[in-house]
Amino acid sequence: MSIVIEGANIIDGTGREPFQATVTIDNDRITSVGEGGGSNEDERIDASGLTLMPGLIDAHCHMTFDEPSSNDELFFHRREGLAAIIAAQNVKKLLNAGVTAFVDPDCIFDVGVDLRDAIEANVIPGPRMLCGGNALLTSVGGTAGRLIPDEGLRGYAKIVSSPEEIRTEVRRQIKIGVDWIKVHVTGLLPRQSIRGEIQAWSLDELKLVCDTAHELGIPVMGHCRNAESIRDAVLAGMDMLLHATFMDEPTLELVCEKKVPLVPTFTFQANLADYGEAVGADPGLQNVFRKEIEESAVQIRQAYEAGVPVLCGTESGFSITPYGDWHYRELEVFVRDMGFTPLEAITAATKACGEHAGFRGDTGSIEPGKLADLILVEGDPSKDVTLLGNPDNIKRVMVGGKSMPLDPLPPREPINGWRTSQYSSGILTKQRAKDI
Ligand SMILES: [Zn+2]
């Protein structure tokens, strides 16, 4: 199967200025970028007036959560079979948004692995996917407070305590086929003395996770939201850091020296900070998030300038970040808050993810030999990355040279027991009743 795409303005994902060329695809890979291909192709696509670029890669997307509005909903109101069926529908929203690959760091049950296998086997259409299993937490917990038990599994969280438990769980996940091990290195405590999150693992424990996974050839990523946790995650040998906010000078130096890829994932905070009023967010929390972005953007920019790979990831999968709507948003924040040029932001959402998020450099750019994971876009995203946020601009999405169906999904009816609902937003005292 041979396809020729001609007439397009090309953004190749490497950071190079846009240029005109003809792209030839044979089977699932790009075979030439330049002069017109041969004349015996099976399909010739006239892309005049459109931009051809690598599809977006979202390095942080929770495909199995289905947009919960609370940890309570996510932990106690999900069923395994239904979560899998719904995730199989939701991945189509990523295709519609021009996402051709993504990393799902952690999932509920073991649905992530099943979803990836279903996509790879052509059972359902979807972007190229890499996945973790359950996130590893100590009994200190993560960001869900007392909802995390002292042992066992809850929601996405697997609680591990002894070295034996750590080894067994890492090996179990690798046995079922995860691409990544994910560790929640920091969490929130009700009476902690420091700002941000607190480190919930010792360096030795983190080393044990990394050594056990690396012995079996699997990389490890860490959710880190303070300086010490970033330092220890790097020292333990982690391969990618999510958030990586609140660094101090020595930590920043260490990150710059070791060049561990960072996925700041500002989208969740930026959405709450910028649009939180629309969903009744607490103004105090909006300010906290705005500050976290502003402060951390400066440090992550410094890391980027020192050669640390910085990747786009959006934390899609929550009520604040529904599937399909916000995969372009991290690029916008990189441009606005980190001073990236639009082309640099596009590289952070394409080639950089292809090289550093576990895809082994096989996807993410328009170069001979790469997988043909491509999108055709109306307009020029090298001038304005927010064009990528309008699904009407996404004209064609190819994964491995195959054009994907781009049909809008039908609206959903409520599912019994799936969403949590409140009796009320306040307490109905007699006084309140009188005040009506
Ligand atoms: Zn996440």
Image (cartoon, rainbow, N blue to C red):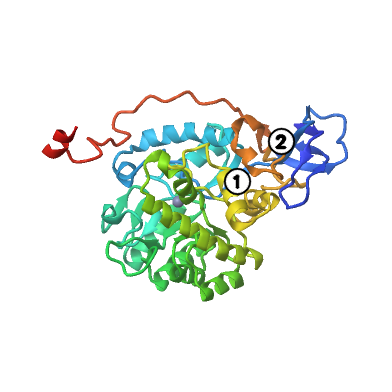
Q: Nearer the viewer, residue 243 or 239?
A: 243
207 vs 242: above or below: below
Which labelled disc corresponds to residue 44?
none
Residue situated furthest front in the rendering:
435
Q: Would you identify the image quadrant in which residue 405 lies?
A: top right
Three-letter code, disc 2 = Gly
The residue carrying mark 1 is 57
The quarter of the rendered structure image containing the N terminus is top right
Residue situated furthest left in the rendering:
430
Q: Please give the name of the residue rendered at 87% of the width and 30% of the height, measured from the top-left corner.
A: 39
Label 2 sits on a secondary structure element that is loop
Residue 89: image x %, image y %? 48, 31
Q: Nearer the viewer, residue 149 or 391?
A: 391
Three-letter code, disc 1 = Ile
Residue 416: image x %, image y %? 30, 28
Q: Please give the name of the residue rendered at 42% of the width and 44% of the height, measured from the top-left corner.
A: 276
58 vs 277, left or right, is right
Which labelled disc corresponds to residue 379?
2
Asked whether residue 267 is in view, the answer is: yes
269 vs 328, left or right, is left
296 vs 326: above or below: below
Front of the two marks 1 and 2:
2
Label 1 sits on a secondary structure element that is strand
